[in-house]
Amino acid sequence: MQEKTLRVLEYNKIKEQLKKYTKTTAARELIDKLSPYDNLYEVKEHLEETKEAFKLLTTKGNPPFEGIYDVREAINKAKKESALTCEQLLRIASMLKCSRSFKEYISHKEEEEGYRVLEDICIGIVPIKKLEDEIFMAIVSEEEVSDRASDDLYNIRRKLKQKSSSVKEKVNSLLRANSKYLQENLYTIRGDRYVLPVRAEYKDQVPGLIHDQSATGATLFIEPMSLVNLNNEIRELFIKEKKEVERILRVLSKKVTNNIELIENDANILWELDFIFAKAKYASEINGICPEINDKGIIDLIEVRHPLIDAKVVVPNSVYLGREFTSLVITGPNTGGKTVTIKTVGLVHLMAMSGILIPARSNSVVSFFKNVYADIGDEQSIEQSLSTFSSHMTNIVGIIEEADENSLCLFDELGSGTDPTEGAALAVSILENLKERRCRVVATTHYSELKGYALKTLGVENGSVEFNVETLSPTYKLLIGVPGKSNAFEISRRLGLPEYIIKDAKENISTDSLNFEELIQSLQAKSIKAENDARIAEALKKDAEKLKEKYEEKLYKLEKARENALYSAQREAKNLIKQAKEESDTALKNIREIERLGYSSDARKKLEEERKKIKDKLEHAELIETKKQEATGEKLKKVNEGDEVYLPRLNQNVIVISKVDSKGEVQVQAGIMKITVKFEDLRKSKSIKPDKAIRKMEKREAKLRLKNTPTSVDLRGMDSEEAIYTVDKYLDDVYIAGLGEVSIIHGNGTGILRSSINDLLKRHPHVKSHRLGKYGEGGTGVTIVELK
């Protein structure tokens, strides 16, 4: 993107606005480096991350950035294995805590919509809670190490307190004994040693070491000989304390150095999140939306506002091109809003292509352009001896040389600054040349010739900024499809120009020109109404589509609930029968035990009869169920994987996904459920023709399954058995969802969990290959799995 375009469209002012919402210098530096992305995929991803951050702000409030710092200096020192200060260690710990909190912040319930892009970013965060806790336990503040940091430090400080208490008692007794020789009846400290303020003339009366004297020389600060040993002991303890503190800081710094790659990675992710949420907060400030984006040159900005104009006074406008026409020529009076309009179109495109939400209404559409060119403003140069016209032509020459179908070209007062006839001819030629190249062009002009060119040329459309003749002021509203009407005669009449002069002026204008102006006036009202009707229709259509999608999703959830309820009811019925059998056998066993204690054979006979009744009832219930199943279709002799068969108990066709095992059981896929059934329960497939609604629901189900299946599973904190069960179920889910590659997070630890998972992956039927993560993927704490 040209630097001149960014400057003319005031893109840097948007970046300065973004910086106000950051927490760290590192994030502000990311904003300094920000420029429009150079491919459509990146633009979509960065818009999505800002949209997700904006949603999190509105649903969960401000992100947990408490404790985020720019710790690059501390990281660089740790890389060199230098000792860090209390402040630097504390800030690193705060940053680690912040990164850990962020993983909780973006978490969501299984049924809730996720945050795909932000979750992918945050998956790289590796909590180092042990180091974090050690630093917080050892350091109280940015200047003080805690007594709990080590046993030695605790003992040293306890002795210091005891010695300080002893020396204070001794000093107080000396004060009382030597009060008549002292300048003041109090003690002071010089160089960490307790001293007395003795009058100079009595220095021989208080034997000791002189440490200092007052400015006048009248007072000497003497350390009495009886305090020397105590002061020496205190001094020694201070030295020991300092050495112990330095040792503790070195140990903690060494631990930081050992984890420096993870710490730096977490910090980089946090600074990126700081940058992303700055974009989201700015979007909240300007009431921004995430536009639809395409690479076909289609622009449809609905009630777009210039982001740098006060929201209370800015007039929203709708601008569109790229479908029926590719060039828009805007006419109208000076100060009517033409320049603001083309600047708005250019700036919101730069914002969208930088992943920043734009100030417009929802359903607005922007296009991805490889280059945006802008020739706006008077750039007359005295140094280069360039006139206004020459300066504009120099810019236009550069645009003509480079512009293509992936370019957006913005021209303000095209062809101005020279003879009107020649200027208009040049302007028409430039527009025609760019149109043939299929560039998207928005240009403003005063020339009537360009109005006519736009009216008669396919692919070029007129536009104008509205002017209120009653108030003699512009309304700043853009009208597309209508060229601007001069209004010179009406304005002159209202300002008091005599009617006869106006009449003479009209006679000097050809009848065709007057008719043309009248035609413009009549078209204006019709165009405004047609445009409003089309906008309303388009909005209603999009609302209807959203409503349709919403109810399709509800239908899917209803069908899923029905399937689950049916399956649960059948499973519960089987459990009840099984439980009844077990209770019957247990009761009979207990009765036999009682019989051995003295019951007669007659009692036993009656009990056997009762047991037989219970058994007959259970067998009868099972027989009825079996006959019901057999009556629903033809039995199968064999099945193969992938066959479609009928399962009577679910009353639906299912897909066989495994071979018959030694128990006579087979695994089948029923909708979104994967269940194990007996082979003898399967019947020949019934021809069930799904209607359109069911087919749509199945497509919607597949999309939702893929969307709701995470790309990673976290096993940290689980034992081997629980982890193997979780991974096995997870691999089934992602295989059904159709994912190609997933991550299994097991951490480093003792390596037992990683070994167990690797053993499972080697023999799992869905796994094509697996490997340990690389740098940036989680290293040896993550296993990357490629699915078949």
Image (spheres, rainbow, N blue to C red):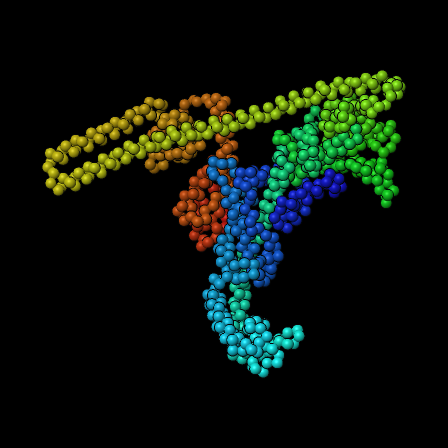
Q: Relative to residue 174, is residue 406 depicted above or below?
A: above
Q: Position of residue 200 (x, y in %)?
A: 62, 79
In this rendering, position of residue 354 left or right of residue 146: right
Give me the residue at 66% from left, 74% from top.
Answer: 216
Residue ID at (19%, 37%): 588
Residue 772 point in image, percent of width and height: 51, 49
The residue drawn where x is 20% and y is 29% is 613
Residue 760 occupies quadrant: top left
47 up-or-down from 514: above or below: below
Q: Residue furthest bottom?
A: 204
Residue 724 on image: x %, y %: 42, 45
Q: Please identify the quadrant where the N terminus is shown.
A: top right
Q: Residue shown at 84%/30% (left/top)? A: 426
Quick check: can you spot residue 193?
no
Where is residue 783 drawn, in percent x and y? 49, 47
Comparing 304 with 701, the one in front is 304
